[in-house]
Image: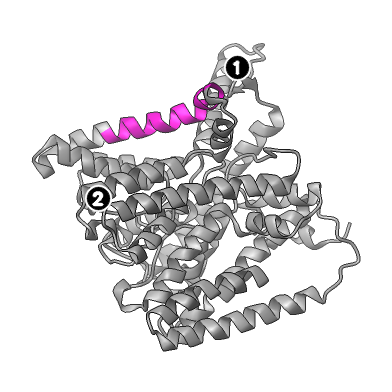
Amino acid sequence: MLIEAGLLLIPLVVGLIFHEQASVRAFLITVCVTAAAGGLLLLVKPAANTIYAREGFVITGLSWIMLSLFGSLPFIISGQIPNPVDAFFETVSGFTTTGASILTDIEALDKSMLFWRSFTHWIGGMGILVFGMIIVPLGGKRSMHLLRAESPGPSSGKLVPHMRDTAGILYGIYITMSALMLVLLLAGGMPLYDCFINVFGTAGTGGFSNHGASIGFYDSEYFEVVIGVFMLLFGVNFNLYFLMLLKRFRTALSSEELHWYFGFVAFAVITIAANINSLYGSVHQAVRHSFFAVSSIITTTGFGTMDFDTWPQYSRTLLVFLMFVGACAGSTGGGLKVSRVILLQRTVKRGMRRMIHSRSVGSVRFEGRMMEEDTINACLNYLAVYCMISVASVILVSLNNFPLETNVTGVIACINNIGPGLGMVGPAGNYASFSMLSKLVLSFDMLAGRLELFPVLLLFYPSTWKRG
């Protein structure tokens, strides 16, 4: 809470620069309230400070909910998003790097509010608890359980012996890549304020923009290429960047997940470009728009240059498939993760082999090593829970009586932290028309998707709260 209060000072300064008195007052009140809450929590002295897996899940789940609640206060206090549920939805969408929005007129918000809205992407991209580990040292196992609960992907571990150093390395890579992108956008002539907004949205793979037309506002191939490339780079497992820092280039570039990731991208870009070529009159323009859309969707960023909901059915269907796949484990992207898709494909292949050859033992190999049964079972368990939450959410959202395409892709876009779907929630639409119940359901989906389902789901599991 104290870290969030400190981070809220940054948009407050932005409000002072642009002379936005109402927003400055809202941020100042929020900083005081959030800091006071954090200060009061410091007075609580627990009988034991051991953090096991259960505590790690609960701390992570509750922290993200509280961060979103307090982070929504500036919108409510300033009156720019007066409805608390709408403000909570928008803030959850920011922190979880989803990019789903209830705003119908983005430019109507103050610049400081839009800055905070996008800054939540950058904060949530790597994870605020990971950032907290750098500032507040914890024991090894305590840090490990927090990192595992917050990090996206089927597994997470230490890059170096101390978890605090691991968190520092991850953020060091994150900040360096963000700074490099900022320089490249400035070199192309983008205004400094817009540069920060687009860097936050790209680095966190979130997609909030300060323009209703998103990246299409600039109508610049240079910006589209820079942002498109960096979306893909932020969708790569950050452990591979660490290996490159150690000059272990061969190990990093031999990653199976990396090959599959770029394989999906190449296949989608080429085939979608061929499918939409007649709409744009030239191969170059078709490839340009296909590349940006594919980069935006597979990394779950959600930026847009064109309304892909108007594209042919094949292109729309393939983009929906990419929504499920998502980016690499250990990246800032969402979705099932490429590594899980690989493991599921190989597990199914092994199962079919056993149906034919009943005595066959078989094994599932990934990244050059044999996968343990616990890892495979965890992957299958994740998929089962993912499907159950998705189905339940679609049923609840369907109470709005919106078209099936809108309901299904809206849930998919939220649980996979993408933002835009199809129909009413397409690149040219938003979530403003959904009921309060649906917005709460979709907020739950966004939090569950960002935190790999279980840290949020276990909050509703009775055994989680039993002693012992």
From the image, tell me which residue sits under label 2. Answer: 308
Q: Nearer the viewer, mark 2 or mark 1?
A: 2
- Residues shaded magenta: 250-269
Circle on res. 121: none
Q: Distance between the residues labelled 2 and 1?
A: 42 Å
Q: Residue at x 45, y 27 (%)?
A: 259
Query: Camera-side residue: 437 or 310?
Result: 310
Residue drawn at the location 65% of the way across and 54% of the way down: 130
Question: 94 or 215: which is nearer to us?
Answer: 215
Secondary structure of the residue carrying numbered label 2:
helix
Q: What element carries label 1?
A: helix
Residue 41: horizontal and vertical position, in percent?
76, 75
Instruction: State which quarter of the image contains the N terminus.
Output: bottom right
Q: How crowded is the residue under tag 2: few (<14 C-alpha within 10 Å), some, or many (20+)?
A: many
On screen, residue 214 versus residue 71, left or right, reads left
- The reply to whether residue 385 is in sight is no
Q: Position of residue 194 (x, y in %)?
A: 33, 63
**Nearest the eye: 313 or 247:** 247
Give the residue type that dot 1 points to: Arg
**Residue occupying the point 40% across, 82% down:** 80
Quadrant of residue 160 in the image? top right
Residue 354 got which mark? 1
Q: Quadrant of residue 114?
A: bottom left
| Quadrant for the C terminus in the image | bottom right
Q: Is tag 2's residue or tag 1's residue first in the polypeptide sequence?
A: 2
> Magenta: predominant secondary structure element?
helix
Taking the image as shown, residue 372 lies to the left or right of residue 28, namely: right
In this figure, what is the number of numbered marks? Answer: 2
Q: Is residue 361 left or right of 109 when viewed as pictured?
A: right
Query: In the image, is residue 195 part of the stretch drawn in magenta?
Result: no
Q: Is residue 346 above or below residue 88?
A: above
Image location (x, y in percent) of residue 262: 40, 31
